[in-house]
Image (tube, helix red, strand yellow):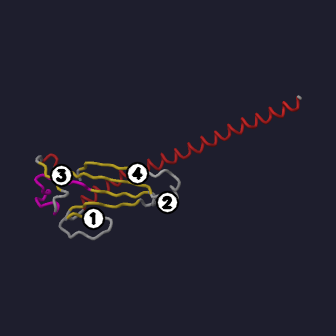
């Protein structure tokens, strides 16, 4: 009778230890996925901020007197940049940037010329303090085909910002 009890006790201890091992492994895998997703989300946020700064530089550097080039990554509304497309150098992220409004005092830029050919992007303002602002919307998404982030939760970050280039 004693040997039978010891066998049942040994099987019970093995079941308890295997259950604890399974729970530990499950917790570790959940924790690793959470840390990985948090890291990728933080990278996407930093990429979105750098895209915002690059957009401001593109708006500042755009020559409104020159004819608009037919670049597939940029679209124009007359002389105004309307949208831009960026991809990260490592291929993890894709960014679509839409410039929704140019806030101009009496609808003209600093040189006194009309800024955009159509009124879809112009927003006339009546105070010179707000002159020159642009409303920028940046949407950053992960590239699901990238091998470095395959299997992680898809990330989509939308940033709306009012900036003065």
Label located before the other in sequence (4 or 2):
2
User: In this figure, which residue is indicated by the disc labeled 1?
Assistant: 75
Please tell me which residue is depicted at 52% across the width and 45% down the height of the picture.
Answer: 35
Name the residue beneath numbered marker 4.
Answer: 156
Question: Depth check: 154 or 99 in front?
Answer: 154
Queried whether the magenta region covers residue 18, the answer comes back as no
Q: CA distance from mark 4 to mark 3?
A: 27 Å
Q: Against 20, is 140 above or below?
A: below
Q: Nearer the viewer, mark 4 or mark 3?
A: 4
Q: Residue at x 39, y 60 (%)?
A: 87
The residue beneath circle 2 is 146
Would you say 33 lies left or right of 42 here? right
Residue 107 vs 76, above or below: the answer is above
**Is disc 3 in contact with disc 2, using a CB cutoff of under 8 Å?**
no
Label 1 secondary element: strand
The residues tagged by marks 3 and 1 sit, at their Cα atoms, a distance apart of 19 Å
Report which residue position mark 3 lands on. 103
Q: Is residue 106 above or below residue 80?
A: above
**Lower position in the chain sequence, tag 3 or tag 1:** 1
Per the rendered image, the range of residues in magenta is: 99-117
Graded by Cα atoms within 10 Å as few (under 14), some (14 to 19) or many (20 or more), the crowding at tag 1 reads some
Gap in Å between the C-alphas at discs 1 and 4?
22 Å
Q: At numbered mark 2, what does the secondary structure look like: helix, strand or loop?
A: loop
Residue 53, position in %: x, y?
31, 53
Q: Earlier in the sequence, mark 1 or mark 4?
A: 1
Which comes sooner in the sequence, label 4 or label 3?
3
Q: Earlier in the sequence, mark 2 or mark 1?
A: 1
């Amino acid at each position: 009778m004693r040997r039978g009890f010891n066998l049942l006790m040994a099987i019970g201890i093995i079941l308890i230890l295997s259950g604890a091992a399974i729970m530990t492994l499950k917790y570790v895998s959940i924790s690793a996925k959470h840390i990985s997703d948090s890291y990728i989300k933080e990278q996407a946020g930093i990429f979105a901020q750098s895209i915002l700064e690059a957009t401001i530089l593109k708006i500042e550097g755009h020559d409104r007197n020159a004819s608009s080039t037919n670049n597939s990554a940029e679209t124009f509304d007359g002389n105004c940049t309307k949208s831009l497309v960026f991809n990260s150098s490592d291929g993890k992220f894709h960014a679509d940037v839409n410039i929704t409004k140019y806030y101009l005092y009496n609808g003209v830029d600093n040189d006194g010329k009309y800024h955009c050919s159509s009124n879809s992007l112009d927003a006339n303002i009546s105070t010179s303090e707000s002159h020159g602002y642009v409303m920028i919307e940046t949407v950053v998404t992960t590239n699901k085909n990238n091998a470095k982030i395959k299997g992680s939760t898809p990330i989509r970050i939308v940033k709306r910002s009012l900036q003065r280039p």
